[in-house]
Amino acid sequence: NAGVTQTPKFRILKIGQSMTLQCTQDMNHNYMYWYRQDPGMGLKLIYYSVGAGITDKGEVPNGYNVSRSTTEDFPLRLELAAPSQTSVYFCASRSVSGTEAFFGQGTRLTVV
Amino acid sequence: DAKTTQPNSMESNEEEPVHLPCNHSTISGTDYIHWYRQLPSQGPEYVIHGLTSNVNNRMASLAIAEDRKSSTLILHRATLRDAAVYYCILRDAHGSSNTGKLIFGQGTTLQVKP
């Protein structure tokens, strides 16, 4: 059972570079979320989506963009990476009628 | 989103029960109480949730105060594998706000001693 898959697992970026964090789920979940977690802190919601073609900002959206062209995929785009974006990024999904959110294993990003 | 308050850290001995408290004095009538935990170097995982009544599952029990302003996650026999950060989260299950967003606080870091 794949669940929520995030790639890559680790990445080092230089300041000003851009990249896309990939997230895919095989559970046909409508709801998907992106979080970031700084060391010793709880998770902060960046963006979320309630279905293909619909996205909305979370608590900390600045510096990020998302798209949701299919139910399965919810990529997170970083433009002009900054050291403040050094963090661990988690993707999650949930069904409309379900209670439990399923999280990926995370992407550890370092911006130097 | 209603806020929750949890102790920063707690310690327990292996094979003893653990009671993890959570205060949510501004909870609304449609807020469900969810608990997730995050093992080291992993994403959060669902533990349990409830609305008004106490709940039990294979992982834990959830005791909810009668006025719903607080709740307690109970691990009946802590093991070393239960060492994690435990998050208490409120989620509104109704209306246009039902996007399933989970807003995380700092959580409680549970240490389990052998």
Image (tube, rainbow, N blue to C red):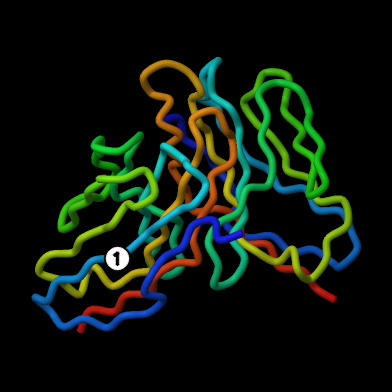
Other-residue count near label 1 (Cα within 10 Å), few / some / many at <14 / 14–19 / ≥20 = many
Residue that label 1 marks: A21
Where the C terminus of chain B falls, by quadrant? bottom right
Q: Position of residue A8 (x, y in %)?
A: 36, 74
Q: Residue sitting at 28 percent across and 73 percent down?
A: A86
Q: Is residue B28 left or right of residue A66?
A: right
Work out whether A74 lies above or below A82. above
The quadrant in which residue B84 appears is bottom right
Residue at (24%, 68%) from the top-left corner? A85
The image shows residue B110, relative to residue A18, as above or below, that is above
Q: Residue at x 41, y 76 (%)?
A: A9
In the rendered view, does A56 fall on the left or right side of A72? left
- Position of A12 relative to A87 (above/below): below
Q: How many marks?
A: 1
Q: Amino acid at mark 1?
A: Leu
Chain holding disc 1: A
How far across and down, in percent of the image, does residue A6 sit? 41, 65
Q: Quadrant of the N terminus of chain B?
A: top left
Query: Which structural element holds mark 1?
Result: strand
Side (left or right) of B47 relative to A60:
right
Q: Residue at the spot x=83%, y=61% of the render?
A: B78
**x then y, percent, for residue B37:** 62, 55
Query: Residue A38 location, x and y as percent?
Result: 37, 66
